[in-house]
Image (cartoon, rainbow, N blue to C red):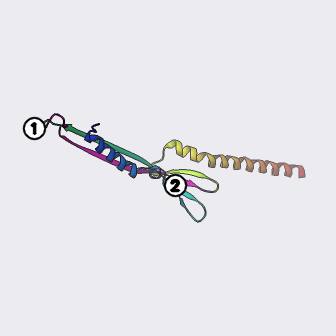
Amino acid sequence: MFEHPINGMMNSAMENLKEMVDVNTIVGEPVVSGDGTMVIPVSKVSFGLAAGGGEYSNKEIKPENANPFAGGVGAGVSVNPMAFLVVTKTDVKLIPVQGEEPYSRLIEAVPSMVNKVAALFKNNDSKTATASEESTEE
């Protein structure tokens, strides 16, 4: 069966793209520090592929032969770092490379706000307990 020349060109381009882009391109190899903290790079990968061609006829070609073909294939890959996933013994954080979204800043601020509010209540409780102890001593 006759295979059109564009098939071979497309297959070759796709094989080359597969070699360039794999899972480790998107979620990189972790880097581990001495204290056990692990930093994992996360990237955005985009790629494009274009192919084109055409056949032209030639009166001198015998009918059993295919018409001559002219064509080309082009491909491109773009890898952009997006964030780093930082994993410690007690915490996991996603640190974006570019400007943070307001929502992510708000979500990251919630634990510290809860700790501050809890500390305020603890201080108020200890002050109330001290004041009641002083009033009972009188």
Q: Which residues are magenta?
A: 62-88
Q: Which residue is mark 2?
A: 40
**Residue 63 image point, x, y percent:** 16, 33
Q: Which residue is mark 1?
A: 60
**Residue 110 image point, x, y percent:** 61, 45
Image-quadrant location for residue 60: top left
Dot 2 amino acid type: Ile
Dot 1 amino acid type: Glu
Residue 70 painted magenta: yes
Give the answer, above or below, for where 50 lies relative to 98.
Answer: above
Residue neighbourhood size for the residue with mark 1, other residues' Cα within 10 Å, grouped as few (<14), some (14–19), many (≥20): few
**Residue 79 image point, x, y percent:** 39, 50
Q: Nearer the viewer, residue 92 or 11?
A: 11
Q: Nearer the viewer, residue 70 or 44?
A: 70
SS type, badge 1: loop
Give the answer, above or below, for where 47 lies relative to 84.
Answer: above
Q: Residue at x 24, y 39 (%)?
A: 52
Residue 26 painted magenta: no
Horizontal arrangement in the rendering, residue 4 relative to residue 25 (left or right): left
**Residue 66 image point, x, y percent:** 20, 37
Q: Residue at x 81, y 52 (%)?
A: 130
